[in-house]
Amino acid sequence: MSRRLSRSVIEPLNPKLNVSRNANLPHSPGVRVGDYIFLSGMGPVDPKTGGRNLGPIAGQIRQTLSNMAHMLESAGSGLDRVLKINIVLADIADYDEMNRVWREFFPADPPARTTCALQLSNGNGVEIECIALGGSNVADGG
Amino acid sequence: MREIIAAPAPGLDLRHHYGHHQTVAVRAGGLIFCSGMVAVNPDTGEREHGTVTSEARRIFENLKLLLESAGSSLDRLVQVHAMIYDRIEYDVLNRLYRQFVPNAPPARTVMSVQIEAGFKVMLDVIAAA
Amino acid sequence: MGLQREIIAPKDPALGVPRNLDLPLSPAIRAGAFVFVSGLVAIDPAGERMHGTVATETRQILAAMTQVLEAAGSSLEKVVKANVLIYSMLEYNNMNEVYREFFPVDPPARTVCGAQLSGGSKVEIECIALA
């Protein structure tokens, strides 16, 4: 029987991006377990105000992926260590636009991805979650 | 290697009861991957349609049973896809949900999707073994 | 020394779905103990998105998934979790009947739900497998 993996909560260095705490929601921004990081679904939160950054979908996706980069970097990881991303759009018609923005963040060797359209809250046009590798300089937790 | 985790109670074997071609949970690489869980009676497998609250409560109780039988626990959940039939029930879900994962809760994405058999809630989870 | 991730490129170029559909994603990534496979939709031998019935789309997707996993040194038997998205849960049985052919023994954990998919596809399947 192998050792149990250790599990710990990840929080963003920028407290404005800690939606779990700020909105008093029953999730953690992310969880590290062994070599992997699982992030909660994230939306277009403004890192300066903590409020929603709505507007055209391209801007929302850019904001969300930037926030995701920050979250991962706060945990010693980064967008280049993302393994799998799930993108939820409020409107599947935004798919092509989403792909255009996506390329800006993942110009080469993009992660695995699944996209679908579902109802989202608060007028958000997008919600994104991911599984990533932990930081390369952090000891294996398990 | 991957390891099949047997249903700890007969009602949780949805493959047997409903022909869902899936295993209740699989352990691999230090993690436990669970099939989507809906509100069924753990002994009989009977569907227990109800409110978001009653269905979610039943699901969490079944999940606790499943994870503990596999040497894990609700505290070791790492990722949850909380699927609800309509996002309007978001707050209702949260009220019940926080009772079961009060401390250091797992990562979560709430997804409003069509769920089987008219259920209002389904939880799709990964836990640390 | 930290873990690295590795992009998986399947041998059959028609399965380079992302390239053929000009989609900026990798069919699969291997890292540590696992292979993470992107949501796959049905494509035809020319690499174009294929629109069929739920049954034919499911069959094509799982055949493609077999090849993607083999390119990663894995296999369908090593899948630990599959997530199936269908455009309508009314078609569940049509998907399930084909699905069971591909996982005859000890099928992986699975979640199935109804969601809106891109490009008019009726089925999309992603998975996590042991490397």
Image (tube, helix red, strand yellow):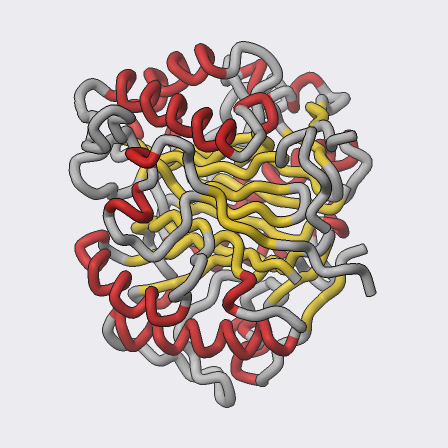
Quadrant of the rendering where the N terminus of chain C is positioned: top right
Picture quarter with the C terminus of chain C: top right
Q: Position of residue B62 (x, y in %)?
A: 48, 77
In front of the other: B23 or A48: A48
Quarter holding residue A13: top left
Residue at 60% from the left image edge and 44% from the top image edge: C127
**Is A50 placed left or right of A74 in the picture?**
left
Residue A45 % position (x, y): 27, 30
Which residue appears at 62% of the width and 36% of the height? A134
Q: Position of residue C117 (x, y in %)?
A: 38, 36
Report if residue C101 is visible in the image: no
Vertical comparison of A138 with A8: above or below:
above
Residue visible at 62% across and 27% down?
C27
Horizontally, residue C72 falls left or right of residue C101, namely right
Name the residue at 42% across, 73% down: B59
The answer to whether residue A119 is above or below residue B2 is above
Q: Give B98 or A99, whichever is nearer the viewer.
A: B98
- In terms of depth relative to the viewer, which is nearer, A66 or B23? A66
Q: Number of marks in the image?
A: 0
User: Where does the image place residue B86, in percent across and percent down from the top left?
Assistant: 23, 55
Above/below status of A39 relative to A108: below
Name the image quarter holding residue A112.
top right
In the orientation shown, which residue stands out farthest toward the bottom? B43
Q: Is residue A122 visible?
A: yes
Would residue B15 appear left or right of A126 to someone viewing this image?
right
